[in-house]
Amino acid sequence: MKKNIYIRRATPEDAYNIKKIHVETYKKSYRGIVPNEYLNNMPLDDDVIERTKKYLETAECWLAFIQNESVGFAYVSDIENKTFEINALYIHPDFQKQGIGSHFVDFLCQNKKAKGCLKCILWTMKFGPALPFYEKLDFKRTNEEKIWKFEIPIIKLQKEL
């Protein structure tokens, strides 16, 4: 049963919650893909929080809540040709596989479609845990691939809105 999900624009005051979700999701979802040394040393210190606050002053970031608890976030950006990109989407590990991510992607796509966007793109690990999730949401693989940090191949996906 899907819980009530509330989504709103993030503000600089949300920086700590966003980075906490980011770090905890990375550590759980990318174990075995990203080197353990990197995962075990991801900082959640004042410097990281301050940089995130600064970034949130201009970035378009959305935060998902269940009741009053932040459970996920997404960074998006508008690009050319009535297209927007989901630059990052993370759901806290304790709340994954509950329909929150699907609801969040649908919210982002509907929000951007209402503002004139016709297509959504994103990049994800070619062999990572998110690829089947996005394909289930009707994102299609493109022929565009590149190498991300740690020599991990990533692939561009797109969806017509």
Image: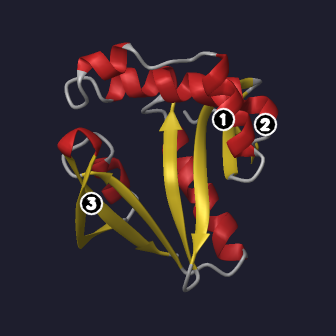
Q: Is residue 125 left or right of residue 12?
A: left
Q: Residues under labels 3 and 2: Cα distance?
A: 30 Å
Q: Which mark is residue 155?
A: 3
Q: Secondary structure at mark 3?
A: strand
> In this rendering, is residue 1 above or below 85?
above
Q: Nearer the viewer, residue 159 or 4?
A: 159
Of marks 3 and 2, which one's residue comes earlier in the chain?
A: 2
Q: Secondary structure at mark 2?
A: helix
Tell me if label 1 and label 2 are in contact, CB under 8 Å.
yes
In the picture, the quarter occupied by the N terminus is top right
> In this rendering, is residue 132 above or below 44?
below
Q: Nearer the viewer, residue 151 or 135?
A: 151
* Residue 148, x across and y down, in percent: 28, 49
Seen as rendered, the residue at the extreme front is 47
- At 61% across and 15% down in the image, what residue appears? 45
Q: Can residue 30 be seen by looking at this rendering?
A: yes
Near mark 1 (Cα within 10 A), the count class, few <14, some 14-19 or many ≥20, is some
- The residue identified by callout 1 is 52
Residue 20 image-quadrant placement: top right
> In this rendering, is residue 20 above or below 55?
above
* Residue 89, x across and y down, in percent: 50, 45
Q: Which mark is residue 12?
A: 2
Q: Residues under labels 1 and 3: Cα distance?
A: 26 Å
Q: Is residue 30 left or right of residue 14?
A: left
Of marks 1 and 2, which one's residue comes earlier in the chain?
A: 2
Q: Is residue 1 left or right of residue 138?
A: right
The residue under label 1 is which amino acid type? Thr
* Residue 102, x across and y down, in percent: 50, 49
